[in-house]
Image (tube, rainbow, N blue to C red):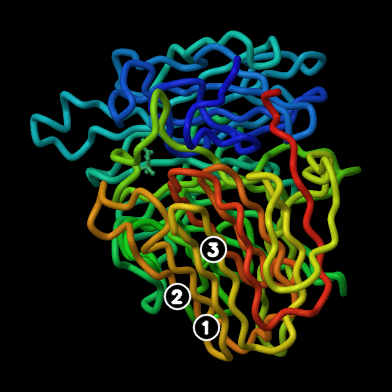
Amino acid sequence: LVFNEPFRPQYHFSPPSQWMNDPNGMVYWDGEYHLFYQYYPDSNVWGPMHWGHAVSKDLVYWEHLPVALYPDENGWIFSGSAVIDHQNTSGLGTKENPAMVAIFTFHDPVGEKNGRDDFQTQGIAYSTDKGRTWTMYEGNPVLKGPGIKDFRDPKVFWHTESNLWIMSLAVKDKISFYASPNLIDWTYLSDFNPAWAAYGGVWECPDLFPLTTEDGETKWILFVSINPGGPQGGSATQYFIGDFDGTTFKTTTQSVKWLDWGADNYAGVTWSNVPETDGRRLFIGWMGNWNYAQVVPTHPWRSAMTVPRSLHLSKKGDDYLLLSRPIEELKKLRASQAEIKGEKIQLENELMELDLRTKSSDFRLELANAFGEKLVLTGDKENLRLDRSQSGIIDFEKGFANAQIASLNEIAVETLTIYLDRSSIEVFVNGGELVLTSIQFPKQPYDKLRLEGFEPSNRAYSLKSIWR
Ligand code: FRU
């Protein structure tokens, strides 16, 4: 596989060809991180959904595998999750060789066309050979809706305290929780929809998981992707911090928080079954936005994932903050290191990691090429701003050429870690206190870096492609 087309991500995951959206079913098992994804193998725009599949031993280098789940008489295969059924609660594997069980939404296009309100249901499928072959459970669907059209994206985890599987489900403008002893029989538990949350669009792709602060305090985090209604327009993911007692999730914070302030991180969720010896909560998101994902100028594939990130919880006064950091494994990609001295630097490579220290709250960073195309990142006391209005090809959608403004909310920018790939930029402030992910399509790689307001010496690494 060459994967060297214009704009082809060189170290971000992308499908070999055709359309991809949400990451699905991420699960670690027997030395492999599985990544499934919303996939339409017959076109490079959205259509009848399948689950594409890839595996990685280190979350950096990926091996593409055949399509895992195909539409059947219950419908197309929408987003969902996967677990390892260690105790064989489902009876679909054995304790010695536990089943990998995928829990996903069936979207019945015929029911939708006929104006029904029960066309989204939840189904399961299982594999006993490390995800290589899959069998649909014959009693599908396992959970039917209460007559609400948007009833999807099940994310399931094993809740040790209650000895039950817990499912978070996106139901129009709320998250509903369900419980099951066996992944087959599900009982409704509760709803979550606080009045002050962001409701600019439909709620999708929830994820509920615990995180512990450095001081040993454990809180539960709930992710809710919304589309539209994100801070830059279109898609984005909000998160809530609170407590989960096995039945109900209650927030202890009272304001909308964005997992990523950029325009292009959506529907992200976390890996299940990561070994306790690792202990990390690992995340990947879809590096796209429904406002224009289907018309971006790439061929023969569309879309990529963010770099994998580890999530951390920190206490800030009375409030909590979720930090997202690029995983350590990405350091493997470093090919050569250079000291950045001065304000104008010629970049040797289009794939870069930049580790920068600011001098004050006012700074400016410009990445440009010989065509005069540029990306401009600026900071002041209040905001971080990424302007992609002259970043390259922008005319495929009216709103693409925007300036993305992130509210710093008292965060004083000290360090910036920037990952630049052929068609994306990810900016991590102060080790993940604020993140901004954005895509762009320059006709030629940016090779000139201009810095204003940074310390005199910074570091830059050229990165390797994972495909060569
Ligand atoms: C989010 C989403 C999910 C749905 C899937 C369909 O991007 O709309 O809610 O399951 O994509 O592809």
Residue 8 percent across, percent down from the top left:
52, 33
Choose between 140 and 280: the one closer to the eye: 280
Residue that label 2 marks: 405
Badge 2 element: strand
Residue 157 place in picture, x, y as percent? 63, 42
Residue at figure coordinates x 63%, y 63% from the top left: 449
Q: Point out the frontmost of discs 2 and 3.
A: 2
Q: Can you tell which quarter of the image residue 76 is in?
A: top left
For badge 3, the amino acid type reads Asp
Label 2 crowd (10 A; few <14 / some 14-19 / many >=20): many
Q: Tell me the quarter of the image containing the C terminus.
A: top right
Amino acid carrying mark 1 in the image: Asn
**Residue found 56% across the figure and 87% down from its top:** 380
| Proximity of marks 1 and 2: CB atoms separated by less than 8 Å | yes
Q: Who's the residue at 45% across and 21% down the image? A: 17
Q: Can you identify the residue that label 1 sits on? A: 383
Instruction: Compare residues 393 and 210 and report the one nearer the observer.
Output: 393
Locate residue 21: give its quadrant.
Answer: top left
Q: Nearer the viewer, residue 370 or 364?
A: 370
Amino acid bearing label 2: Ile
Task: Tell me, for residue 2, which label it has, or none.
Answer: none
Q: If you read the primary sequence from the N terminus, does the residue marked by circle 2 or circle 3 appear first?
A: 3
SS class of the residue under badge 1? strand
Residue 260's label in the rendered image is 3
Q: Is residue 263 above or below residue 83?
A: below
Q: CA distance from mark 1 to mark 2?
A: 6 Å
